Amino acid sequence: METFEQRLKRYTSENDLEIFGWLTIYLQNAYLRELRLAKENQIYHCAYLITHSIIQMISENMFGLTGKDGTKFYLESFVDEGAADEKFSLITDEIHDARNVMAHQGYSSLQHRVEYFANDIAEGWKQEAGTVYINPDIYAEQFENAFNHGTHVQKYRQQTDEIRIIRKYKYIRQWLRLDKMNLIAQEIKKLETYTNIQDIRNQESVVQQMIYNAYGIT
């Protein structure tokens, strides 16, 4: 197993896919395995909570989107399939708010107009008589498909080098658990002020050296 210092050096010295490529593999090996078990055993609260965790991790860390914006982006980019009832982004509000109820409240008036556990319908989701019905089995199956095709990394690669460097160091700051007043965190924040790739590369060198000095990496 890597030491803390070895992993930090790898994260800082190699390209961003050392972080985000392995992040998607980790999610596939760990979280997707648990999602399959939750679906097979009809543990649907767990299924929704696991998918929400994956959504927020990937949307925020790889694409810079949080909250409901991150949920909509993720569903459109990685879960939606062909037919209208397979486009779960059309019910982003219901899926996103369902997680908030499950994680923070337990009960909500939302449960009187959304049925989250409708595994007996043929569609992925449908709206009928003012109620939205969601089939968690189909939702989980489509959710898994993107991982099987490596879609996350393919889309991530479409971003510019400038954006990818910023994403990399934001993740490292989070991984190191640095607060905003930390000097390294402040230098990482400066990356966002540059638009020219050479300026960003120069600032990256500053950040790398500060990290190496702070954590005794050679």
Image (cartoon, rainbow, N blue to C red):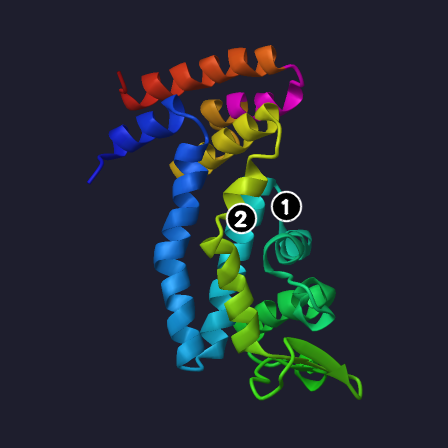
Mark 1 crowdedness (10 Å alpha carbons): few <14, some 14-19, many ≥20: some
Decide whether the magenta segment is chiefly helix, strand or loop: helix
- The percent position of residue 85, horizontal first and vertical second, equals 70, 73
Q: Is 143 placed above or below 178 here?
A: below
Residue topped by disc 1: 65
Quadrant position of the N terminus in the picture: top left
Magenta highlight range: 187-196
Mark 2 crowdedness (10 Å alpha carbons): few <14, some 14-19, many ≥20: some
Residue placed most toward the observer, 93 or 178: 93
Distance between mark 1 and mark 2 Cα atoms: 17 Å
- Could you say which disc has been placed on residue 140 in the image? none
Residue placed most toward the observer, 158 or 191: 158
Quarter where residue 120 is shown: bottom right
Q: Is residue 29 visible?
A: yes
Q: Is mark 2 on a helix, strand or loop?
A: helix
Query: Viewed as shown, does residue 47 lie left or right of 6?
Result: right
Quarter where residue 42 is shown: bottom left
Q: Which residue is drawn at 54% across and 41% down?
A: 154
Q: Can residue 177 be seen in this view?
A: no
Q: Which of marks 1 and 2 is in front?
A: 2
Q: Residue at x 59, y 11 (%)?
A: 199
Quarter where residue 132 is shown: bottom right
Residue topped by disc 2: 151
Query: Viewed as shown, does residue 102 lie left or right of 26?
Result: right
- The percent position of residue 179, horizontal first and vertical second, equals 48, 35
Q: Which residue is drawn at 63% across and 58% down?
A: 75
